[in-house]
Amino acid sequence: MNMHDVVKKVLITEEELDKRIKEVAKEIEKDYADKTPVMLCLLKGSISYFARLCENMNIPMVYEFLRASSYHGATTTGDVKVSNLPLLDLKGRHIIVVEDIIDTGLTLSCILEVLKKYEPASIEMTTLLDKPARRQVEGIVPKYVGFVIPDEFVLGFGLDWNEEYRNLPYIGVLKDEFYK
Ligand code: IMP
């Protein structure tokens, strides 16, 4: 089976991703020039965005990783599990949470609660994709957004459908027959 067969249409091409991520990287770089931020990657979906973003920021930074899972298939369960707690000392540090997509906002609100306990100097969020139409939690406002997208189930560039298709190099929309 060819993995491109589950894609109804390409929503964001490889070229568009590359161009926009470089722009966001420059914005963050400007704001964090003297702060050596902790770039916090939310596994697994953010991995492609995280790598592309960080390699385009020409300032000192450190990497950290958190695992948050809330999805089974194409619908949310609202049940967020957080694991791989950070090993770095986050107290007094400037954290930038790097997310692949914000949908209901439940995942990020749980993550923010966990992170606040470490007493960082600041926490900001960046997301590659934002689906504001689906937001259930108030106050989840990412400072740096790649693309605002409509309420469709997307996959590729780190985002999965049932754990697969993360390696598609673009953001695609899943065919309707798979979306339940
Ligand atoms: P939230 O907690 O509803 O904001 O969902 C955030 C998480 O759900 C993301 O980190 C993704 O892993 C997953 N997710 C939300 N929408 C999609 C989608 O359209 N495709 C793939 N994963 C998604």
Image (cartoon, rainbow, N blue to C red):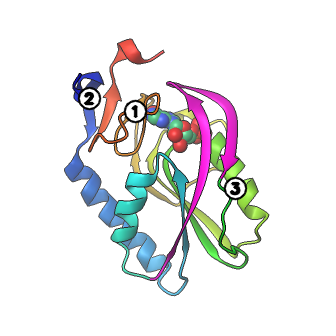
Picture quadrant where residue 103 is located: top right
Picture quadrant where residue 65 is located: bottom right
Q: Residue at x 61, y 45 (%)?
A: 68
In the rendered structure, are the residues bearing label 2 and label 1 in contact, judged by CB atoms less than 8 Å apart?
Answer: yes
Mark 3 is surrounded, within 10 Å at the Cα level, by few (under 14), some (14 to 19) or many (20 or more) other residues, namely some
- The magenta segment: 60-83
Q: Find numbered disc 1 in the image and state the secondary structure of the residue it sits on.
A: loop
Residue 82: say if magenta: yes
Residue nearer the viewer, 107 or 143: 107
Q: Give above or below for 104 relative to 88.
A: above
Q: Which mark is residue 164?
A: 1
Q: Residue at x 23, y 48 (%)?
A: 14
Q: Find numbered disc 2 in the image and state the secondary structure of the residue it sits on.
A: helix
Residue 19: say if magenta: no
Give the farthest residue toward the top.
Answer: 177
Residue assigned mark 2: 3
In the rendered structure, are the residues bearing label 1 and label 3 in contact, judged by CB atoms less than 8 Å apart?
Answer: no
Specify the amino acid type for callout 1.
Glu
